[in-house]
Amino acid sequence: MSVLLTTLTLLFTLISTVTSSCTPSDLAALQAFKSSLNEPYLGIFNTWSGTNCCSSWYGISCDPTTGRVADINLRGESEDPIFEKAGRTGYMTGSINPSICKLDRLSTLILADWKGVSGEIPECVASLSYLRILDLVGNQISGKIPANIGNLQRLTVLNLADNELDGEIPASLTALANMKHLDLRSNKLTGQLPADFGSLKMLSRALLSKNQLTGAIPNSISGMYRLADLDLSINKISGSLPGWIGSMKVLSTLNLDSNMISGPLPASLLSSTGLGILNLSRNAIEGNIPDAFGPKSYFMALDLSYNKLKGPIPGSLSSAAYVGHLDLSHNHLCGTIPVGTPFDHLEASSFSFNDCLCGNPLRTC
């Protein structure tokens, strides 16, 4: 019995040692990663000392069974006590050392909102086959999105917003079959959305505003049955609005403002029972506003301003269940503004700069 107890004690000691320290290769990779970064105000890298990176190293977590580094979670904006004590958000400079790619069991890589991290995303990041979250938002990272990003088959979150990335969206990105959240806002991306963008069947949020994207909205998006939020605003998207957008059952927010979209306004967008936010302002949409609203229409915000719309305001808008914010200004609309809701709570700015609208809250007809 005593031999058995001794053996078990040694075994538990060995397991404890394995699960509380990282391997020499992971340790070396983290040390190289740290050497390329400078964080002068909070001192988070002061905790990165000794050889036991799985215990008390700020932002580092390890797999308890393998002892391998699984998560790097470094956010420059946090409610962590280290930020509260310093009374400031974080600021970090430097670049992402390619040594990060030696952490081949990495599941989460978050280096977000540090404002000064620059350089490029190492191409070898696409080899981290266990990666589920890649979040580099809010830095000054430049260059291109790794061409083989589609190799990351476990990836569910890709957030590269608020950086200085350029070039086209890699064709391989549409192979990320498990991705749920894509945020590429506020970069310098060019070219068209991949024609097979709709292959991202699990995607619920596609945020690509404030880039230089061109071309039409790919028809493949019509098959994205989980997509709830599509934001392509402030780009150079052209072509006409496809009618199928209004038939997407889960889509609740559609932002296409400040593009080069032309052609008519599909009735399906206004009769949709799912869309709650629709912003099509600052385009070249023309023709009449379809008389397609119904008792299940529920718009928290409906912005059609700065287009080339003409004709009257459709009377069916009064039958909508709810319209919170409405902006029809800067068009060529003409006729009497309908009475009742939602018109009884709207201001004149919602209807200003049209050809000949009249009635409350504008001049009397």
Image (cartoon, helix red, strand yellow):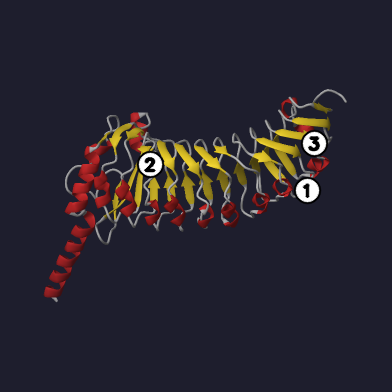
Q: Earlier in the sequence, mark 3 or mark 1?
A: 1
Residue at (78% x, 48% y) in the render: 294
Residue at (25% x, 60% y) in the render: 66
The residue indicated by pointer 3 is 313
Q: Secondary structure at mark 1?
A: loop
Mark 1, residues whose alpha carbon is within 10 Å: few (<14), some, or many (≥20)?
some
Q: Secondary structure at mark 3?
A: loop
Q: Nearer the viewer, residue 18 or 269?
A: 269
Question: What's the CA distance linking mark 2 and mark 1?
Answer: 45 Å
Residue lying at the far left in this picture: please name it. 3
Circle nearer the viewer, 2 or 1: 2
Give x and y (percent) for residue 11.
17, 67
Question: What's the CA distance linking mark 3 and mark 1?
Answer: 14 Å
Give x and y (percent) for residue 208.
51, 42
Q: Examine the image and state in which quarter residue 341 appears.
A: top right
As drawn, the label of residue 294 is 1
| Horizontal arrangement in the rendering, residue 344 relative to residue 71 (left or right) | right
Q: Earlier in the sequence, mark 3 or mark 2?
A: 2
